[in-house]
Image: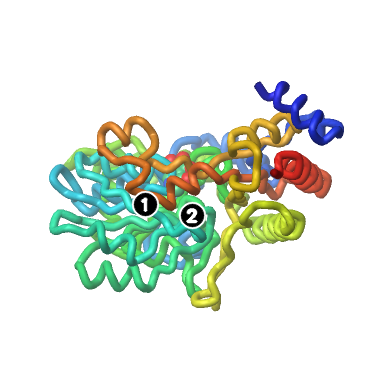
Amino acid sequence: MSSEILQEVLAIEGGEKTREDFLVFMSPIIEQEAIDSVVESLKSGWVGTGPKNQQFANDIRDFIGIKHVQLVNSCTAALHLAMISLAIGPGDEVVVPTMTFCATVNSVLFTGATPVLVDCDLNSLNVTRELMEKKITNKTKAIVVVHMAGLPVDLDPIRELAKEKGLPLIEDAAHAFESKYKNQYTGTIGDIGCYSFYATKNLTTAEGGAFVTNNEGLFKIAAQASLHGMSVDAFKRFSKSGFKHYDVSMLGYKYNLTDIQAALGIAHLKKINDYLKIREEIWHSYNEAFKDLPVVTPQEIPDSFAQGSIHARHLYTLRLDLEKLNQDRDYVLNALQAEGIGSGIHYKPVHEHSFYAQSLGYKPSDFPNASKVGRETISLPLSPKMTPGDVADVIKAVRKVVLALRK
Ligand SMILES: Cc1ncc(COP(=O)(O)O)c(C=O)c1O
């Protein structure tokens, strides 16, 4: 498929393939310091959940300014723990964006509760108070926001809504570790924040995540549920302070993050602001290069809350103006692939995946904005590992493909 498209695009445009060695969409940067940190952890003999895990949790706590951090093995786990700590279960509803990764919605389904999906704003791809408010019923037990691509959600109106209705607010900040909303880190503003440290994320431990909160009660439930529901974790049970018995006093899961992973995170966190600066530069180069193309470049933080706010610039998501192109988004994606450039889609909205369409009974017209974005969006490589040559190749390939397909 790709090579046919390449031949077609080359025939239209008449150029050479942009690059021979494939540029992977979101290849993580792993520097020597991070490798040394992992090796040190391996040599220490404590490879499970132990001192490095504690150190990483403390580092995160200090970085974002929060009272409690429970490290887990994914953001999916953190979101599930959020639901558990809020005692969400069968018969309850949780209002969740449809413009997100499936895990946000799955965390509600894990508990037997019903996710009630919400459309997104067409420009920010984020939810708004107006969109969420319409979905709240007397069964609603919590609301979830996702800071899409690292652009912070306008949280004040949503916090007011949550307060008016007496509902807890969960922030899925999987894309937004370094984002700030009016001087506060996203993830620390609602009742619970959930981060992802997956391989492609701004802060990575290969796989990992964190549940964060200022509420001690919620933290205690999440911490216990994250490790089999045991009252004392392994580090405390086997450490030099002496053996301790444990009691399983609730249903729990196996969600702990290992020290090997935490060691990677500790080193990565030290570089996080440097990496953000590199992504910012790439971002601005893309914006400048695509100004004259039939595309919509990603929205910046609106002036109304720009003061003290930060965009984590996790995903550079272009929206193609399909009315001005001869082909659809998937054609563009395949043509970029044929040019040697990897790209992604964020997202085909949750309601359009067959499992949710069948089990929740939604149709694309229920969420016109998310459905439109899902057809038009394409994410370009955005990694601090990229060289200026990589950035130039992405620009060259995007311009070549889009211009060749322009009506
Ligand atoms: C918005 C969002 N929420 C949750 C997740 C789940 O994260 P993890 O892979 O760490 O479980 C992702 C992962 O990409 C995500 O993008």
Tell me which label, 2 or 1, sits earlier in the chain: 1
Quarter of the image that includes the C terminus: top right
The residue carrying pointer 2 sits among few (fewer than 14), some (14 to 19) or many (20 or more) residues within 10 Å by Cα, namely many
Helix, strand, or loop for circle 2?
helix
* Label 1 sits on residue: 97
Residue at the image point whose x is 72% and y is 22% from the top: 3
Q: How many marks?
A: 2
- Residue 166 vs residue 95, the one in the foreground: 95
Report the amino acid beneath label 2: Met
- Residue 20 vs residue 39, the one in the foreground: 20
Helix, strand, or loop for circle 1?
strand
- Residue 13 drawn at (x, y percent): 82, 36
- Residue 126 drawn at (x, y percent): 44, 58
- Residue 277 drawn at (x, y percent): 69, 61
Q: Is residue 9 left or right of residue 85?
A: right
Residue at the image point whose x is 39% and y is 40% from the top: 102
Residue at the image point whose x is 24% and y is 59% from the top: 217
Q: Give the CA distance from mark 2 to mark 1.
A: 10 Å
Residue at the image point whose x is 38% and y is 57% from the top: 145
Report the amino acid beneath label 1: Pro
As drawn, the label of residue 200 is: none
Quarter of the image that includes the N terminus: top right
Say if mark 2 contacts mark 1, CB within 8 Å. Answer: yes
Which quadrant holds residue 200? top right
> On the rendering, which quadrant does ligand 1 occupy?
top left
Using the image, determine if residue 169 lies above or below residue 241: below
